[in-house]
Image (cartoon, rainbow, N blue to C red):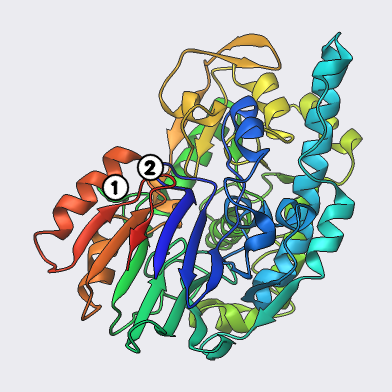
Amino acid sequence: MKLTSYGAALEVTGSQHLLEVNGKRILLDCGLFQGHRKIAFEKNQEFEYDPASIDAVLLSHAHIDHTGNTPHLVSKGFAGKIYCTEATKKLCEPLLLDSAYIQQQDTEYFNRRVKDTALEMDPIYTEEDVKLALEHFKGLPYDTQYTLYDGVKVTFFEAGHVLGSSMIQLDIVDQEDGKEKRLIFTGDLGRYKLPIIKDPHEPDHADYLLCESTYGNRNHAPIEEGVPELARVINRTVERGGKVIIPSFAFERTQELIYSIHLLFDRGEIPKNLPVFIDSPLATNLTHIFREEIELYDKDIRENFRLDHNPFDPSQLKFTASVEESKELNFLIGPCIIISSSGMCEAGRIRHHLKNNIEDSKNTVAVVGYMAENTLGRKIVDGEKRIKIYDQMYKVNAEVVILESFSAHADRDDLDRFIKGIHGLKKIMLVHGEQNQSEAFAERIKTYSEAEPIVMEPMKPVEL
């Protein structure tokens, strides 16, 4: 049994991990690398393995850095099934179609600017490729064991990260030695007591753990501080007469923000007539799916979900559909909240809102999620005073606030708690983390576990 990482090893994006067992090649996640657009395009162009050689794909959740390369995989010869939870399957359709659209827009923009037609690029995949890939998807229920192959069974358990997210448990009878072995892949592990989503499943035992390490050596502010801090940010920006600009992933983070802002309106903790705009057609489509998946919510939100009081639909909320409606937000006078994708500010309408608002000191840019290295969002988080948007430089005069309480990734204490609850571990392979986070996490694991911690390196196989 052998495991090789082809993405999200010593980095936090592009998850692709190949498990070879009993003569089968099983890919755990098939994500796009996300980051600076030029680097991302180059890294996503080719696979470091033969897609036609893959027997099956198991997806942990619908985020594009975990699913976004599946249409490309199919177009290059993959002919097997793509397994995931039923909610992830439903969410992947709008997410993958949006990914194809963004690629088309980016390549058209690039091709207009190059004078040599030999340098022109094609998108990595098209909307037609997405439609073909979706035919390979098979949704499976949570907590139900499914036989992939003789001696290989899979179960999806709640990961507590986003709607439909799962940790993937593989129970294997190794044909070489006849022994039973259990491998668990965390995907992106969520936090305990997050709003909307149920808490992560807590496995009792496993032999091997493939574990994310995004915040392997950092703790977040307590979840309970998130909504009050958001209220403080909104209110002081309103007092200045400014706008709150929130770059947000269209999936999950936007819905969590809508829910949190709804709570603040209900409690009278922010001005009751403050306009809130969701400037992302994708977020609009995904929010409709959230309204349909009530059974996946935690107990508190299920009890509060009523037709006359929808937690994802405060009366002040406005979804912008067309480009024209989005452009009209540039001419708004007075305070408002604008939530727009993408979360890392490398694509989408958020770049226009930053361009038009970041030089005004009355405004606030509120960061509510992880920003990968070399992205525009990371430059803002790192405090750069001048940033480039659409080839022009802009001064960062707006207040920049980092709201870490809204992170949906397990932090250092969450990860330690999770690992300490799993008995029998022999090896813990760390992925989905920048090098400093993964290495510090590995050293800490040695202080409380007998398992061997391994920081996975790109394309360097580990024998299990």
In the rendered structure, the answer to whether residue 59 lies left or right of residue 452 reads right
Marks 2 and 1 sit apart, C-alpha to C-alpha, by 7 Å
Q: Is residue 131 above or below residue 326?
A: below
Residue at position x 22%, y 72% from top?
426
Image quadrant occupied by the C terminus: bottom left
Residue under label 2, please give it. 10
Q: Amino acid at mark 1?
A: Ser
Q: Position of residue 185 (x, y in %)?
A: 42, 68
Q: Nearer the viewer, residue 157 or 69?
A: 69
On the image, numbered disc 1 is attached to which residue? 438
Q: Position of residue 162 (x, y in %)?
A: 55, 64
> Which residue lies at the image location 62% right of the left edge and 64% below the top edge?
54
Label 1 sits on a secondary structure element that is: helix
Bin the neighbour count of mark 2 within 10 Å (Cα to Cα): few under 14, some 14-19, many 20 and up: many
Identify the mark nearer the N-term, 2 or 1: 2
Mark 2 vs 1: CB contact within 8 A: yes
Q: Is residue 402 above or below residue 179?
A: above
- Identify whether 448 is placed above or below 308: above
What numbered label is drawn on residue 191?
none
* Residue appearing at x 52%, y 91% in the figure: 145
Is residue 357 in view? Answer: yes
Locate residue 30 relative to residue 119 in the image: left or right. left
- Residue at the extreme left: 447
Q: Nearer the viewer, residue 282 or 141?
A: 141
- Split into 4 quadrants, where in the image is the N terminus? bottom left
Where residue 198 appears, x then y in whole percent? 48, 76
Q: Amino acid at mark 2?
A: Leu
Q: Is residue 217 above or below residue 426?
A: above
Q: Position of residue 450 (x, y in %)?
A: 12, 69
Q: Residue at x 60, y 39 (%)?
A: 247
